[in-house]
Amino acid sequence: MAESIQVFRSIAIAGNPNTGKSTIFNLLTGMRQKVGNYPGVTVEKKTGRFYGSHGEVMELLDLPGSYSLQVRSPDEAVSRDVLLGRVPGTPRPDAIIAVLDASNLDRHLYLVAQFLELEIPLIVALNMVDVAEERGLSIDLLALRDRLGVPVIPMVASRGQGIIELKQALSRATLHNSDRKAQLPIVLEREVAALSRILKCHSGSVRPEAMLLLSLEDDRLAAEVRGDTALLAEIHAARERLKLSGLDPIAAPVDARYAWVSEVCASVIHRRGEDSHGLTFSDHVDQILTHKLWGWLAFVAMMALMFVCIFVVAQAPMDWIRAGIQALAKWAGAHLPEGDLRSLIVDGVIGGVGNVVVFLPQILILFFFLGLLEDSGYMARAAFIMDRLMSRVGLHGKSFVPLLSSFACAIPGIMATRTIENRNDRFVTILVAPLMSCSARLPVYAIMIALLMPASNVWSKAGVMLCMYLLGILAAFVMAGLLKKTLLRSETPMLLLELPPYRAPVVRGIVQRMWERAVIFLRRAGTVILALSVILWALLNYPKPSTPDPTPSETLAHSLGGRMGHAIEPVIAPLGYDWKIGIGLVASFAAREVFVSTMGQIYNIEDADEENEDLRTQMRDERRADGTPVFTPLVCLSIMVFYVLAMQCISTVAIVRRETNSWRWPLFQIAYMTVLAWIGAFVVYQGGRMFGFQ
Amino acid sequence: MGADAEKAEPLSGLQPGQRGRILAIDVGGANKGRIMEMGFTVGTVIEVVRFAPLGDPMEFKVRGAHVSLRKADAAGVRVQRI
């Protein structure tokens, strides 16, 4: 996709969530898509190209789904700024495609009312006309076109219907601004006009900007005028005048637009039959899925299915990847001369990156499920069901899904927080997400449980494992509650959640999104994680001991990392750890599961993993200077608790940096989780000893 | 408004299946605009669909769409039962 191609027209596609907007975007652009970021914010910028009816190059920009142009979340701010032409590097679109759900024009036309105020040519993609038809709604397309003054294209995007007509409409030589819009009260219209004159001309349109400023909530307004106190005073004066004439500046435009929407609907929609109060398919499904008893059963069953798939189905591909990485390491090891370079490539690069890439199958499966739940409409029901519990710690029902996802891996979980509107709530969710026990902790739990209770049956082992998971959940909830009361103080956010009709998900779209996520993940693995793996490798290999032919454990003990293990011994001694465990902690700072292989390295055991009998025996026989065993049950428990609570994952740090757009939060997260882990392990070890355990 | 105000009751007091016409939206600050933009405008008829399994939040049908609000927020929406 050469940048030099002359773009004939740049078009933005916008609409409420769940209107099939992404499906239309995919139909138009196919695989010619690009995912980037807007400058300075973490909102994804998705663009694609397609050819018009006469071969013109069209640039299509996918705006995040939103209910309004009034700014309440970073997503909405971006949509609004793009449409006003205020985003550097993104030209103001030449046209907007407004995607509407034909079966719910009563609500979806509201956004159209706002678009008409923008003075940008508009094309309405009236999607899901088949659903409207089924519900007995017949929409007079000609009348709708006349009332809106813009082209209206009926579509069934899930089946590709209407896409050619949409392309034709977008390819017209000239597109016109509509002269229709909702009539505002005359006093409000006058204030908008006055404010427009005051506003310095940005590159965009002044009138819609004036309109938005006038009806902006106070807390947002201050940020919006950027210290322009004269302008702020003008806006406040205008609002006072409006209030004197009996108009609420926030409510009046909304009322006016909805009045217009009702009027348009009344003249273009004809209801056939009496079934407007009848129950739809969705209503029937919801009677089960949000039922007091069946709702919970369905919820638990669905989550259980998801986790079984993540842990069972992902097992085989994970083994393949692991085998592939080992084969690659072996091959590289055989073809490189013995020495530091070989060690760097094999242990540092292949081993380090491989440790992270191995989780790709789980991440993909998780994203597939999340996509299914989201697109089918169930995700909103999960938030509806869970909101009561989440609001106890001041969080939103929407925080539930990211936290749940974090049981597989915190990375997709943190990426899923983007649906949370309030910044503080989103950050709290990000900060506590890694406390959910992810799959990378499993190897550590597994070997520690094996050492803790070698003779016990599988049920008591599973019981201990479950306790570790519960501890993580408890810690996440307590921390969320604390953070909400201190650093990220904010009211429990209002829940305003649409429960969209259930729909059959478009698998192609889900797979495409899965692929995008995979690319982001792999790019991370190829850059940040690669760099950190190399640093960590150097830390564990240099400086070299002066003795000839040192064993791996001698090298490790002599290295900077090994010395760090020694250095932190006073700090970790109260937790029951010796310096060798200290090295394990240092080495697994980048990835928890490295703990197991580092232990192997320390005890000179090749191909160590959690199933390795030699490693277990060696660890079991390990003695302190005074002859007592190192890995007592209490120490094993203490290590497990430490790993439940500690951050120990460089990929998560990288993703938190990306999602919060600053180093402050990931650093804070490492700090608080490490402190928490230390305290947790300390309480277990010292508390246990006080009660006479070993 | 006087006569209406007497008949006004909080939306959170309605039971599933009951409907009301919105008389006023007494919701604080930034939330008022958000609620209104989802279709909760004065004069609109709204139906309570159900309560969530744990008793909160509530689900409403408004302007053909299903929207969920917590009881505490729904209490600020004053309706006249019809």
Image (tube, coloured by chain):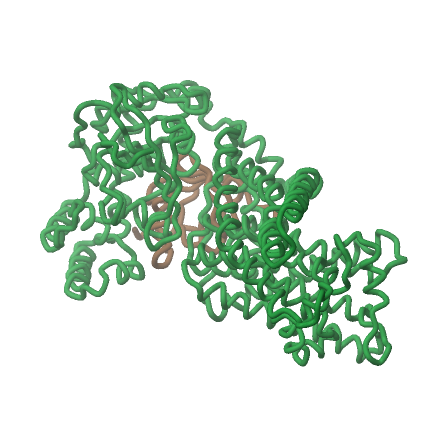
Residue A386 vs A113, above or below: the answer is below
Q: Residue at position x 22%, y 45% from top?
A: A85
Residue A406: x and y in percent read 59, 52
Q: Is residue A94 left or right of residue A593?
A: left
Residue B62: x and y in percent read 42, 39
Q: Let me know if residue A297 appears in the view.
A: no
Nearer to me, A275 or A531: A531
Residue A399: x and y in percent read 53, 53
Question: Which corner quadrant holds the C terminus of chain A?
Answer: bottom right
Residue A330 vs A261, above or below: the answer is below
Q: Is residue A633 left or right of residue A141?
A: right
Q: Colour of chain A?
A: green
Question: Which corner quadrant holds the N terminus of chain A?
Answer: top left
Nearer to me, A244 or A395: A395
Q: Residue at position x 52%, y 36% from top?
A: A377
Which chain, by letter, is brown? Answer: B
Question: Going by the picture, which residue comes out furthest to the right?
Answer: A455
Nearer to me, A499 or A430: A430
Across the whole image, how many numbered discs are drawn on residues?
0
Residue A127: x and y in percent read 38, 26
Q: Residue at position x 47%, y 59% from top?
A: A427
Nearer to me, A80 or A141: A80
Q: Is residue A110 left or right of residue A306?
A: left
Q: Let me know if residue A335 appears in the view.
A: yes
Rendering quarter of residue A366? top right
